[in-house]
Amino acid sequence: MGDNSGLTMSYTDSYNRIAASKRLKDYDILAFACKRAGKSRDEGRAYYSTGVLYDNLGKFKEAIA
């Protein structure tokens, strides 16, 4: 049963990475839309959320870029 739990963890991790990459795209589009609309506060929130997602994925350089 130890092997199955390893596969489950790997699958879960892979699923979370896919979900995070979809959210990253959503936040990029949101930041662009907010910039065009002049909503600087919401644009900042979108960029902040992008940084948090990159941090959670372990991509620290992208998180602070």
Image (cartoon, rainbow, N blue to C red):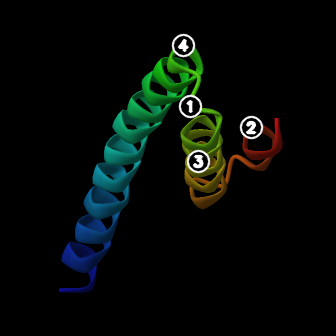
Tag 3's secondary structure?
Answer: helix
Q: Are marks 3 and 1 in contact (CB under 8 Å)?
A: no
Mark nearest the camera among 2 and 3 is 3
Residue 62: assigned label: 2
Q: Which residue is the extreme one toward the top?
A: 36
Tag 1's secondary structure?
Answer: loop
Residue 39: assigned label: 1
Is 51 on the left-hand or right-hand side of 12? right
User: Which residue, given by chain and number where applicable, does mark 3 sit on?
Assistant: 45
Structural distance between the alpha carbons of marks 4 and 2: 23 Å
Which of the two residues, 1 or 48, is positioned nearer the viewer here?
Answer: 48
Indicate the position of residue 53 as horizontal and vertical percent values. Answer: 55, 52
Structural distance between the alpha carbons of marks 3 and 1: 10 Å
Indicate the position of residue 7 as horizontal and vertical percent values. Answer: 26, 65
Please report the residue visible at 23 percent of the width from the left and 69 percent of the height from the top: 8
Indicate the position of residue 33 as horizontal and vertical percent values. Answer: 46, 19
Q: Residues within 10 Å of mark 1 (few under 14, many from 20)?
A: few
Structural distance between the alpha carbons of marks 2 and 3: 16 Å
User: Which residue, given by chain and number where applicable, does mark 4 sit on?
Assistant: 36
Tag 2's secondary structure?
Answer: helix
Mark nearest the camera among 3 and 4 is 4
Up-down relation of residue 20 to residue 21 (above or below): below
Please report the residue visible at 73 percent of the width from the left and 45 percent of the height from the top: 63
* Quarter of the view holding residue 10: bottom left
Up-down relation of residue 56 to residue 62 (above or below): below
Q: Which residue is the extreme one toward the front?
A: 38
